[in-house]
Image (cartoon, rainbow, N blue to C red):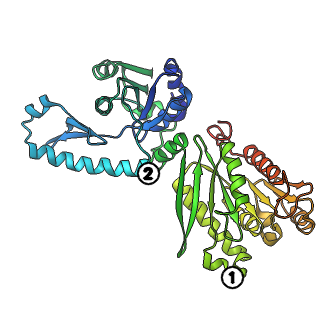
Amino acid sequence: MFADRSEAGRRLAEKLRPLAGEDVVVLGLPRGGVPVAFEVADAIGAPLDVILVRKLGVPIRPELAFGAIGEDGVRVLNHDIIKGAALRPEDMATVESRERAELERRSAHIRRGRPKVDLTGRTAIVVDDGIATGATIRAACQVARAQGAARVVVATPVCPPDTAVRLRQEADDVVCVLTPRSLTSIGQWYADFTQIGEEQVSELLSCVTGMSEEVWIEAGDTALPGELVVPRGARTVVVFVHGSGSSRSSPRNRYVASAMHKAGLGTLLFDLLTSAEETHRANVFDISLLAGRLGQATEWLRAYLPHVAVCYFGASTGAAAALWAAAVPHADVAAVVSRGGRPDLAEARLAEVEAPTLLIVGGDDRQVLELNRAAQALLRCENRLAVVPGAGHLFEEPGALEAVSALAREWFTRHLPQGASRHGAEA
């Protein structure tokens, strides 16, 4: 029995290690096959993609497939079934039109503009979380060949031996971890067989392929522009919080963000205030407003990438907003870093912060240093005050920003939730 799809994928990957280093592509069948395929691709160092197929069912017997379709107009037909069922061209066209529309909807939702991995001349490893009759995966094998795969390998954690024999009519090889003689349901072989959503499938693809996108975040009646960068394998995103509203364009924040990317961490840089709002100085010090916007951005991020760990990196009044937002019950923020921050502006909320907090202050920024020392005394979470010798408030001195980056990177990677760094900081 498997604990979950991830463990099943790791055990399956052990049987596929002889393929490591070859020109292979791992293809997961959405939705349950993708978490298994993710582990396989990670273990053997191969690209991961999905293979989207829709069976074309005979109208009066939908379970009987007269063919299958895939992306880019790929169509595979079973002419014996078509002849035996006396299907008319218009009947087949109606079924194909319906299934093509659903295929395109799923493709747009899952891929989010990411191109397919080219299969031409390569070995395609088609992965599902379990196979009972094998009808869908047989169609996937046909589609993979139609897309140019030179060799097709079916891989699954659990499959009955008679089904595995039948699959060899479509695949060059079939690899299974368990081959029980009776298989009433795939879920009986998993302790956790929670349903996988399309959002999770898209996220796993992002974790393997990486992403860099311009995004818009809805915050009440306001849309805030941002830049989301998720390196290959990243399972953690650091949200940058800048009180002046220029988080996205701040050269200091962009420098630190680059250091996070090199450590395998994703980043979200976005503007907490619009250009018009920023002209009113009072908005920069409206910590409740800034923290509310940050909370909405965090909700957006978790909906977009449901399984990433979230950290905050705040500067100046943005640091107060980060601590304020982290103090909200069930905020579930993995860690907070403040650079030259004003945590004193969140004084009423500091005792409620649970996320491990690092306060970084320049040694020559004496007034802010004293404010941070006083704020540190109010924190009840794990915390540390790090002083960068000779640095001022903006950390413009030679080596100062490098020191900030190193401190932040170490703090974030040390305080990630268990498992969050496996495909991130340790990658």
Please state which of residues 394 and 146 is positioned toward the viewer in this rendering. Answer: 394
x then y, percent, for residue 412: 73, 48
x then y, percent, for residue 167: 31, 22
Give the side of residue 29 with respect to residue 327, left or right.
Answer: left
Q: Secondary structure at mark 1?
A: loop
Q: Nearer the viewer, mark 2 or mark 1?
A: 1
The picture quadrant where one finds residue 291 is bottom right
What residue is rendered at 67% in x and 67% in y? Answer: 246
x then y, percent, for residue 132: 34, 29
x then y, percent, for residue 78: 17, 31
Numbered label attached to residue 254? none
Give the crowd class for mark 2: few <14, some 14-19, many >=20 residues within 10 Å: few
The answer, for residue 255, to whether it is visible in the render is: yes
Q: Secondary structure at mark 2?
A: loop
**For the C terminus, which image quadrant?**
top right
Nearer-N-terminus badge (2/1): 2
Q: Would you name the residue on which mark 2 appears?
A: 112
Task: Give the answer, above or below, for where 39 lies relative to 19.
Answer: below
Q: Amino acid at mark 2?
A: Arg
Q: Would you name the residue on which mark 1 appears?
A: 280
